Image (cartoon, rainbow, N blue to C red):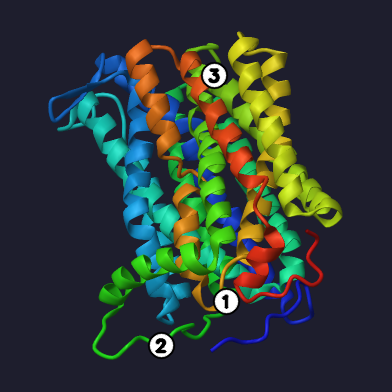
Amino acid sequence: MTEAVPHAFEQGNRREIFGWSMYDWASSAFSTTVVTTLLGPYLSSLAQTAGSINFLGFSFEPDAFFPTVVSLSVILQVLFLPLLGTIADYSTYKKRMLLAFATVGAVATMLLFFVQTNMPVLGTNGAVLFGGFLFLIANLSFGAAIVFYNAFLPDIAAPEDRDRVSSFGWALGYLGGGILLALNLVIITMMDDTAMAVRISLASAGLWWLVFMYLFTARSLKQRPALKKLPPDEGYFSQGVKQIAHTLKTMYRKYPETLRYLIAYLIYNDGIQTVIAVATIFAASDLGASADVLILLVLLIQFVAFGGALLFGQMAKKIGAKRSIVVSLVIWVFVVVYAFAWLHDAGWQLFLLGGLIAIVLGGSQALSRSLFSQMIPRDSESEYFGFYEISERGTSWIGTLVFAAAVQITGSSRVALLSLILFFAVGLVLLIPVNVRKAIVDSGNDPEGVVL
């Protein structure tokens, strides 16, 4: 059973769209403060104090530990997120599951406050492992919640409105994440104990996530009816497992263009997410950037990305979402090449490159989401977004694993940057031949009004 989808910002729909978008405002604090800015360098600094990190007989270089944990968290997402999305399509729990996973992620983030040097009982090595475990739980929960969040997009916006609504959500996310990061910069600047300031900032991201989610999203987002009826004698889990295999076969046979786009997206966005996850580690270890410089850099990216997301939303109205994404990927290739070959200090060049990243960051991700929402069958949004989320915000797995391996082997984060070019180039080559109109029609959606 489906229901009519209102146009964006129609009277009576504005409140729900705003509440939906405010989840991006709430959860982006985790991406910005924890994943992108503070946790990686903080855990690396603790690891350097310990010399190296030892776990089950394995020894990790300080700069390799956090990317390894990111990869592990996403490998778990690969296993669980498609299953969760399938279950959501067969149940009325989409909103509940969004709130539940977000709550777990926010609480795990707040507990990062207790990770410190010479931690009682655990010591420094144990503290780093405990921090990695908390991040594992938080990032897995973050990804799970985003599956259900993204699946609401087709419920609240008609096809011709989705680029605009998706870009609006991304823009609010960058603005919210940027505001909290600015507050954290004040904390780190004013406090003499930098480690304590970082711990407070990490915990604040979880608190921000929790408070704004319950103030806006939980109050305004409406629970939708189940999109599919559960077969007799089947439970949610058993049907979910069966449906994953069925969906992959269906995409291959009935929606080949959607599958091609999804593969292209998983590859190029893995590159984007790797840049986000390791940029501050590179700036800190290779360029010698201090904590306040890193925060200023990410602040620049956040606020410029707010405008960049809106800019690319307008670009998509002129040339279409796919062509706009192609433009962004060409710029991403240039960014990586420049960082490897010419970026050698934490001066004005770093901030100039950060500004260029910001312009394409929000646009490429917002339009990728809205374009995918046009290509999937109406009764299976959560399920399809479960596959999509495998390489969404903060969820790179191959890229961060390759980066961590390169650092482990060479001891240099600069050399590891070279591998990222491949992700953007291959993704671009796979994206260009995707027939967007055919993908929309094959999935049973109407391409009228959509700029192709």
Q: Is 237 rendered above or below residue 36?
A: below
Mark 2 vs mark 1: which is more N-terminal?
2
Q: Secondary structure at mark 1?
A: helix
Q: Position of residue 86 (x, y in %)?
A: 40, 71
Left or right of residue 35, residue 452 in this image: right
Q: Which label is found at residue 378?
A: 1
The residue shown at (39%, 62%) is: 82
The residue shown at (44%, 54%) is: 143
Q: Amino acid at mark 3?
A: Ala
Mark 1 vs mark 3: which is more N-terminal?
3
Q: Which label is found at residue 229?
A: 2
Q: Which label is found at residue 10?
A: none
Left or right of residue 351, residue 73 in this image: left
Q: Is 158 rendered above or below residue 110?
A: below
- Write down the residue under mark 3: 283
Do callouts 2 and 1 mark residues in contact (Cβ within 8 Å)? Answer: no
